[in-house]
Image (cartoon, rainbow, N blue to C red):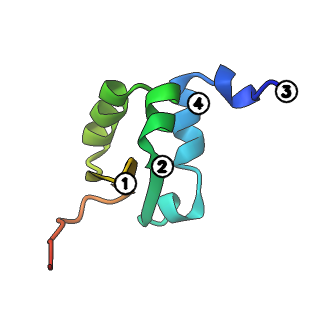
């Protein structure tokens, strides 16, 4: 079976990523680093997040994307 998502441009994939309710409402989304590297490329993706003003953290093979420009505070 062929996965049609393999044929998406990175721009289309990024638009799809940010069409979720959480992203549209300024919430938090997470994606596997390997998926982002496969569909968009790490450097391009991080550049796009910087352009949008969205903080991104990486942990355990996941990117956590804060779809707003609020400051982050590490509590513990």
Q: Is residue 1 placed above or below 15 in the rendered structure?
A: above
- Nearer to us in this view, 3 or 26: 3
Q: How far apart are marks 2 and 1 (CA)?
A: 8 Å
Q: Distance between the residues labelled 1 and 4?
A: 18 Å
Within-10-Å neighbours for mark 2: few <14, some 14–19, many 20+:
some
Q: Are marks 1 and 3 in contact (CB under 8 Å)?
A: no
Q: Earlier along the polypeptide chain: callout 2 or callout 4? A: 4
Name the mark nearer the viewer: 2 or 4: 2
Numbered disc 4: secondary structure = helix
The residue that disc 4 covers is 12
The residue that disc 3 covers is 1
Viewport quadrant of the N terminus: top right
- Nearer to us in this view, 50 or 1: 1
Q: Distance between the residues labelled 3 and 4?
A: 21 Å
Viewport quadrant of the C terminus: bottom left
The residue that disc 2 covers is 31
Numbered disc 1: secondary structure = strand
Q: Are marks 2 and 1 in contact (CB under 8 Å)?
A: yes
Name the mark nearer the viewer: 2 or 1: 2
Q: Earlier along the polypeptide chain: callout 3 or callout 4? A: 3
Quadrant of the image occupied by residue 74: bottom left
Q: Are marks 2 and 4 in contact (CB under 8 Å)?
A: no
Q: Residue at x 45, y 55 (%)?
A: 30
Q: Do the residues labelled 3 and 2 touch (CB within 8 Å)?
A: no
């Amino acid at each position: 079976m062929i996965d049609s998502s393999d044929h998406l441009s990175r721009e289309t994939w990024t638009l799809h990523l940010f069409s979720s309710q959480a992203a549209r409402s300024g919430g938090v989304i997470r994606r596997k680093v390997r998926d982002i590297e496969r569909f968009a490329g790490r450097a391009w993706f991080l550049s796009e997040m910087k352009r949008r003003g969205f903080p991104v953290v990486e942990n355990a093979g996941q990117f956590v994307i804060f779809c707003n420009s609020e400051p982050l505070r590490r509590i513990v």
